[in-house]
């Protein structure tokens, strides 16, 4: 019964970062992933691009698909304006448990709500259960074959409105070809690729920003 990588990440954070300081927790996770064990966080290079896109949009309601250990939840929530909220969906209970502890350690639990379950079940509940009108930003970083079906589901549920910004991780590596084809060819989206690198590596990757035009 050994520990899991998320468990080792959490204990590294608790040992090496400053409690209540999101920037310290973020940089500590990056050090863990560079010096100890690679992990599928958006990382520091794509993270800087994500930061810029979040600040530009100044969002009130952000939805994240794929919490994992909470790294991008911290990056997003630390930049929200007062009253801003992040809802993040996590399928795996073990990951959700670790993410909640990392989020609490960073002191951002009042801004972040971790929703446990498959996105396909949780998305239709958002309006009624969480009084969400429409999402200002949606950060997509879960299973790569779910990006497109979930985007269509979000459209059907009326959670994507004029001006909603979709930000998708890994559109180059591992790649999300069907999603890219959709947002780049749809007349309802204006799409832009931000070239970068796969987290903690030299492989090319990037973020796709797609604005819903209505
Ligand atoms: O596979 C990748 N990501 C899949 C992430 C999946 C996460 O989304 C959750 N989820 C939450 C809700 C759901 O409905 C389904 C899953 C899963 O429980 C997991 O926590 C990936 C892989 C590489 N890579 O280099 O190989 C790099 C990356 O940046 C990646 O994001
Ligand atoms: Mg990713």
Image (cartoon, rainbow, N blue to C red):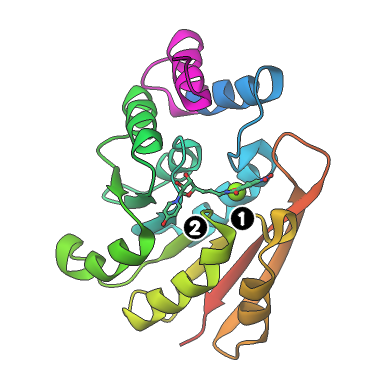
Tell how many labels. 2
| Residue 160 visible in the snapshot | no
Q: Nearer the viewer, residue 128 or 76?
A: 128
Residue found at x 30% / y 64%? 121
Q: What secondary structure is found at the residue carrying circle 2? A: strand
Q: What secondary structure is found at the residue carrying circle 1? A: loop
The residue range painted magenta reads 1-24
Q: Nearer the viewer, residue 141 or 58?
A: 141
| Residue 70 visible in the snapshot | yes
Above or below, comparing residue 78 to residue 22 in the picture? below
Main structural element of the magenta stretch: helix, strand or loop? helix
Residue furthest to the top: 15
Name the residue carrying label 1.
169
Q: Is residue 10 magenta?
A: yes
- Label disc, if present, on residue 139 of the rendered structure: 2
Residue found at x 78% / y 36%? 201
Give the percent coordinates (x, y) of residue 123.
Answer: 32, 66
Q: Are marks 1 and 2 in contact (CB under 8 Å)?
A: yes
Q: Residues within 10 Å of mark 1 (few under 14, many from 20)?
A: many
């Amino acid at each position: 019964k050994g520990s899991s990588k998320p468990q080792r990440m959490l204990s590294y954070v608790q040992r090496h970062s400053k409690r209540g300081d999101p920037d310290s927790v973020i940089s500590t996770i990056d050090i863990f992933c560079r010096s100890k064990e690679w992990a599928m966080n958006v990382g520091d290079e794509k993270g800087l691009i994500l930061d810029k896109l979040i600040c530009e949009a100044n969002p009130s309601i952000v939805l994240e698909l794929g919490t994992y250990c909470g790294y991008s939840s911290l990056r997003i929530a630390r930049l929200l304006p007062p009253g801003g909220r992040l809802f993040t969906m996590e399928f795996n209970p073990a990951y959700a448990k670790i993410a909640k502890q990392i989020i609490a350690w960073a002191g951002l639990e009042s801004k972040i709500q971790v929703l446990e379950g498959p996105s396909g079940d949780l998305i239709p509940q958002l309006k009624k259960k969480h009084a969400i009108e429409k999402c200002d930003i949606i950060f997509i970083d879960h299973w790569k074959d779910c990006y497109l079906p979930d985007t269509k589901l979000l459209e059907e549920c009326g959670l994507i409105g004029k001006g909603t910004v979709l930000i998708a991780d890994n559109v180059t590596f591992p790649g999300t070809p069907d999603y890219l084809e959709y947002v780049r060819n749809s007349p309802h989206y204006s799409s832009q690729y931000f070239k970068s690198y796969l987290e903690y590596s030299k492989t090319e990757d990037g973020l796709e920003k797609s604005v819903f035009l209505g």
